[in-house]
């Protein structure tokens, strides 16, 4: 939300005024442009031709239109017309990891495929002018942010052409019964009316150990201790990270990437997990540089090879992926 937007659309600051059309005019264009820019950056780092992308998974909780934003992204990037598109709408904060899970399934069931995952969000769809009797509105503006992210996911990387960063092993999803009102969002004439119940951090704390144990048992990694792993956690807010750190008995540096992403970008919904993964890779790169400079003994402890990619969203839904950092 900027002064320019409010000057163009002053009705957005008027309580009770129907503004869903104006909000969607802004959001639909913005999420497309952000997704194009994030995807172009990702494809450039990947290093292969855009024509070799076979599938597109598009994630957003910030727009409403059909055809949906995936076709506008495909057109804006110049993707081939026979690309196979999948859209995930209104998954909220768990949407990024849900998108990774879906892209993983597509890649594994279509040998040779390359899946572009794009996440893109803006908060204007849910903006409300702050009121003294509604402190959550101000907290929401302070906590949430806009942005986009992109990943390329596939199987059997081509040596010399592709450098894989993470290997995705097992992905699971689980919802907590009778919690569908804890994160409550509805599309109204004033945009999305969005409420978070104060019980959310407690619900996550109560269920995170069982969920993570299930994820690691499936793939036989239950032998690993929590502090021997990396933790790519969606930073829903400071309270959630603090409770997770305590419940899982994590060392303070284990959630550094999540805390950095929250400080730098806010909770950018589905995008934030992409930022967290990028920070984890950056931390590993810095560790290796320091090791080279200090000429450390090869037998000393290195980074965390195995880890968990984790997010929570409406439902309350837990999304988790057991992964291996291939840059170690």
Image (cartoon, rainbow, N blue to C red):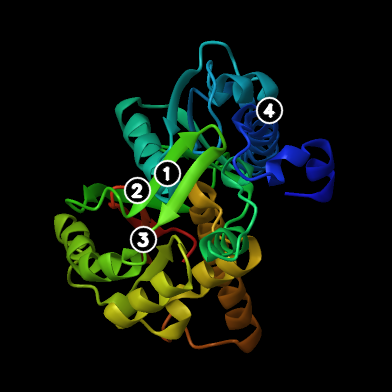
Q: Are marks 4 and 1 in contact (CB under 8 Å)?
A: no
Q: Are marks 1 and 2 in contact (CB under 8 Å)?
A: yes
Residue 94, given in percent of the width and then of the height, sits at: 39, 49
Image quarter for residue 141? bottom right
- The disc, 4 or 3, on the residue closer to the chain's N-terminal end is 4
Percent from the top left, x then y, of residue 320? 31, 54
Among the two numbered marks 2 and 3 on one chain, the one whose residue lies closer to the N terminus: 3
Separation of disc 4 and disc 1 at Cα? Answer: 20 Å
Secondary structure under the numbered disc 2 in the rendered image:
loop
Q: Secondary structure at mark 1?
A: strand
- Looking at the rendered structure, which numbered label has been put on residue 185? 1
The residue sitting at 38% across, 51% down in the picture is 167
Going 63% across and 76% down the picture, which residue do you hit? 289
Q: CA distance from mark 2 to mark 3?
A: 11 Å
User: Where does label 3 land, which residue?
Assistant: 197
Disc 4, SS: helix
- The circle on residue 25 is 4
């Amino acid at each position: 939300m900027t002064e320019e937007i409010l000057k163009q659309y002053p009705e957005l600051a008027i309580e009770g005024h129907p503004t869903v059309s104006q909000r969607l005019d802004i959001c639909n264009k913005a999420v497309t442009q952000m997704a194009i820019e994030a995807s172009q950056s990702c494809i450039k780092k990947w290093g292969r031709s855009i024509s070799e992308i076979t599938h597109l998974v598009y994630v957003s909780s910030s727009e409403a239109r059909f055809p949906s934003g995936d076709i506008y992204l495909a057109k804006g990037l110049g993707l081939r017309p026979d690309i196979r598109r999948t859209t995930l709408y209104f998954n909220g904060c768990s949407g990024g990891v849900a998108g990774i899970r879906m892209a993983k399934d597509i890649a594994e069931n279509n040998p040779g495929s390359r899946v572009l995952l794009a996440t893109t969000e803006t908060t204007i769809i849910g903006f409300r002018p702050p009121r003294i009797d509604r402190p959550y509105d101000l907290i929401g503006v302070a906590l949430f942010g806009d942005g986009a992210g992109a990943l390329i996911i596939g199987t059997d990387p081509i040596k010399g052409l592709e450098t894989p960063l993470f290997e995705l092993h097992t992905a699971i999803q689980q919802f907590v019964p009778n919690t569908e009102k804890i994160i409550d969002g509805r599309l109204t004439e004033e945009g999305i009316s969005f409420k978070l119940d104060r019980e959310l951090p407690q619900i996550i704390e109560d269920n995170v150990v069982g969920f993570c144990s299930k994820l690691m048992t499936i793939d036989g990694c239950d032998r690993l201790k929590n502090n021997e792993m990396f933790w790519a956690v969606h930073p829903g807010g400071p309270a959630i990270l603090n409770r997770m750190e305590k419940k899982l008995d994590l060392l303070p540096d284990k959630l550094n990437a999540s805390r950095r992403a929250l400080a730098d970008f806010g909770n950018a919904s589905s995008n934030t997990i992409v930022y967290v993964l990028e920070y984890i890779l950056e931390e590993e790169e810095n560790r290796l540089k320091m090791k080279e400079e200090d000429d450390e003994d090869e037998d000393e402890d290195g980074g965390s090879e195995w880890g968990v990619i984790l997010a929570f969203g409406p439902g309350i839904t837990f999304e988790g992926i057991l992964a291996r950092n291939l840059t170690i």
